[in-house]
C-alpha cells in the first residue's frame, strides 16, 4: 500500500463517537497560512525548523504545471507565517511525500518521486532556492522513497524506499552527501517485513531503527519494527498482530527513557490505530487504542517528545468535527488528551505530525483544508499550537566527537554569554539570533547543552551524545 492509495480513504471512513478522552479548548491554536495550489498543495510531512529559525517542508502537489496536478514544492515559512516556495519541475523530482532534514553543512536533503526514471530521487536543497539531484533510483536499488532522511553520526544519510529491490518490497539505503548510494537491505516480503513507508532514526546504541507497513503475515499486512546496523545487518524486533496495532506509516522516536514510541495506522481495540511503546529488546506495550470518535483515528505521523516529557502527534481523521483530524498529547504511561480538533477551515487530514520549535510552540501542517478554493477540499495549511512550554535550544547534530562542529538553534540567542556541554565550557560564535556555531570541547561528556543569556539559561531538549 502506498501513501497515495491511503489518501483516497479520506472520504470513506465511518464515524464512531466516544467520550473517553479529555478535550481542551483550542485558544492556543493558530493557522499560519493556507496553500493555494500555485504555491503548493497536499502536505504529507512534518515541517522542520532550520538553523535560521524558519520552518521548511514539502508539498506533494501544486506548483509547476509541468506535472498533471503540479509537481510539488519546497516551502519556507517564518514563525509568524510569511510563506515562500520553490517549485519542482518533474526532471529534478516531483510529488515529495517526505519532509526535509538539514545537514550538518546547513543544506537541506530530501527524497521525491519523479526524476529521470520516474522512480524517485534523492536531492539537496540550498536556502538560496537551488535543488540538486544527487541520485535517481532505478528500481533495482529501490523505488518510491517516502520516508524522511536522517544524517547519522558517520555523516552519511540513510533512508528507505517503499518498493523496488529483488522482491519489490522496499529497501534500506545509505547515501553520501556527494550522492554515492549503497543498498544496505532488500526486504523479502517475509519475516523481515515489506514496504517501509517511514524513515529511520539512529538510536543511542548507534543502530538504525524503523518500521515496515507489511510483514511475514503479508495477507494481513500488519507490519514490523526492525533495527539495522550501519553496515546493513537487519533484526526484526516486533511483528504486529492487529490487536497491538497494524500498518505503521509513521516513524519511531527514542525517548529520554530509552524506549521507542510510535503509532500504527490501524489495529488496536477498535481497529482505528494505536500509540505504542517498545523497549530496545522488542517488548511492546499498547498505550492507547483510537476509538474513531473524539480522539480521532488513523494516526500516520511520527510522534515528538516535548520538553515536558510528553508525546505529541496527530490523528488523520475524525475528532469533534467528523473526518477532519486531531492533535493529541499522550504521556509515557498512556494518559491521552485531545488538544485540537480540526474543522476544515483551519486544516484537515493532518498526515504529518508536529515539531516543537525552540520557542516552545509546536508547528505542523495539514494535507487539505484551509481558506483556498483552488483545491476541492482545500489545499492544506501550516499551523502552530502552544501548550505553555518555554523556549529551549537544540543541537545540529545531536551527537559528535570531540572537536566536531555543532550548530545550536534557539530563539533570541544574540546575548549569549557561555556555552557548555554537560558542564564543560566551549568556545562559540553567535551567527544570528537563532544560531550559534561551536565545537565539542575537549573533556565533554554526554549530557545537556546549555546556553547562558543575560537573564536566563536555555538547555537542550535532548542530551548531546559524545561519540568516539
Image (cartoon, rainbow, N blue to C red):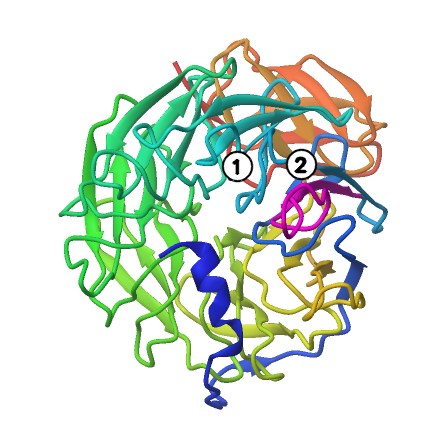
Judge the density around disc 2: few (<14), some (14-19), many (≥20) Cα neighbours within 10 Å: many
| Quadrant where the image shows the N terminus | bottom left
Residue 440 part of the magenta segment: no
**Tag shown at residue 181:** none
Judge the density around disc 1: few (<14), some (14-19), many (≥20) Cα neighbours within 10 Å: many
Residue 307 horizontal side relative to residue 272, left or right: right
Magenta residues span 57-77
**Is residue 229 something one can see in this rendering?**
no
**Is residue 316 something one can see in this rendering?**
yes
Q: Earlier in the sequence, mark 2 or mark 1?
A: 2
The residue under the point 80% across, 68% down is: 371
Quarter of the figure with residue 420: top right
* 260 versus 148 height, above or below: below
Prevailing secondary structure of the magenta residues: loop
The residue under the point 80% across, 65% down is: 372
Image coords of residue 96 (percent x, y): 56, 43
* 33 versus 18 height, above or below: above
Image coords of residue 386 (percent x, y): 72, 61
Quarter of the figure with residue 428: top right
**Tag shown at residue 88:** 2
Image coords of residue 213 (percent x, y): 31, 54
Q: Are marks 2 and 1 in contact (CB under 8 Å)?
A: yes
Element at badge 1? Answer: loop
The residue under the point 25% across, 26% down is: 232
Residue at mark 1: 114
Amino acid at each position: 500500500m502506498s501513501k497515495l492509495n491511503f489518501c483516497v480513504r479520506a472520504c470513506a471512513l465511518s464515524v464512531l463517537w466516544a467520550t473517553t478522552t479529555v478535550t481542551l479548548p483550542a485558544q492556543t491554536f493558530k493557522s499560519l497560512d493556507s496553500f493555494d495550489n500555485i504555491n503548493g498543495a497536499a502536505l504529507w510531512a512534518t515541517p522542520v525548523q532550520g538553523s535560521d529559525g524558519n520552518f521548511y517542508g514539502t508539498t506533494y502537489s501544486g506548483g509547476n504545471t509541468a506535472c498533471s496536478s503540479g509537481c510539488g514544492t519546497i516551502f519556507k515559512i517564518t514563525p509568524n507565517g510569511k510563506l515562500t516556495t520553490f517549485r519542482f519541475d518533474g526532471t529534478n523530482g516531483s510529488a515529495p511525500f517526505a519532509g526535509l532534514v538539514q545537514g550538518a553543512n546547513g543544506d537541506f536533503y530530501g527524497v521525491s518521486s519523479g526524476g529521470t526514471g520516474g522512480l524517485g530521487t534523492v536531492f539537496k536543497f540550498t536556502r538560496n532556492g537551488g535543488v540538486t539531484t544527487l541520485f535517481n533510483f532505478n528500481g533495482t536499488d529501490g523505488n518510491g522513497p517516502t520516508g524522511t532522511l536522517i544524517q547519522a553520526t558517520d555523516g552519511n544519510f540513510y533512508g528507505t524506499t517503499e518498493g523496488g529491490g529483488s522482491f519489490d518490497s522496499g529497501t534500506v539505503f545509505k547515501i553520501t552527501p556527494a550522492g554515492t548510494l549503497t543498498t544496505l537491505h532488500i526486504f523479502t516480503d517475509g519475516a523481515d517485513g515489506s514496504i517501509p513507508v517511514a524513515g529511520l532514526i539512529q538510536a543511542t546504541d548507534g543502530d538504525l531503527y524503523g518500521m515496515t507497513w507489511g510483514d511475514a503475515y503479508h495477507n494481513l499486512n500488519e507490519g514490523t519494527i526492525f533495527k539495522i546496523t550501519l553496515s546493513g545487518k537487519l533484526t526484526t524486533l516486533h511483528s504486529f498482530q492487529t490487536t497491538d496495532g497494524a500498518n505503521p506509516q509513521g516513524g519511531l522516536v527514542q525517548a529520554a527513557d530509552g524506549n521507542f514510541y510510535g503509532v500504527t495506522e490501524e489495529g488496536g481495540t477498535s481497529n482505528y490505530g494505536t500509540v505504542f511503546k517498545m523497549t530496545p529488546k522488542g517488548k511492546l506495550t499498547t498505550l492507547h487504542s483510537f476509538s474513531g470518535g473524539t480522539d480521532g483515528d488513523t494516526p500516520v505521523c511520527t510522534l515528538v517528545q516535548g520538553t515536558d516529557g510528553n508525546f505529541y502527534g496527530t490523528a488523520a481523521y475524525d475528532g469533534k468535527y467528523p473526518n477532519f483530524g486531531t492533535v493529541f498529547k499522550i504521556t509515557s504511561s498512556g494518559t491521552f488528551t485531545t488538544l485540537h480538533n480540526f474543522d476544515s477551515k483551519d486544516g484537515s487530514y493532518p498526515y504529518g505530525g508536529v515539531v516543537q520549535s525552540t520557542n516552545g510552540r509546536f508547528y505542523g501542517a495539514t494535507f487539505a483544508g484551509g481558506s483556498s478554493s483552488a483545491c476541492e477540499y482545500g489545499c492544506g495549511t501550516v499551523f502552530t499550537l502552544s501548550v505553555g512550554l518555554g523556549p529551549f535550544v537544540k543541537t545540529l547534530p545531536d551527537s559528535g566527537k570531540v572537536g566536531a562542529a555543532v550548530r545550536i538553534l534557539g530563539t533570541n540567542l544574540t546575548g549569549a554569554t557561555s556555552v557548555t556541554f554537560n558542564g564543560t565550557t566551549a568556545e562559540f560564535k553567535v551567527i544570528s539570533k537563532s544560531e550559534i556555531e561551536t565545537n565539542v570541547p575537549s573533556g565533554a561528556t554526554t549530557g545537556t547543552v546549555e546556553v547562558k543569556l543575560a537573564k536566563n539559561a536555555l538547555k537542550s531538549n535532548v542530551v548531546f551524545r559524545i561519540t568516539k
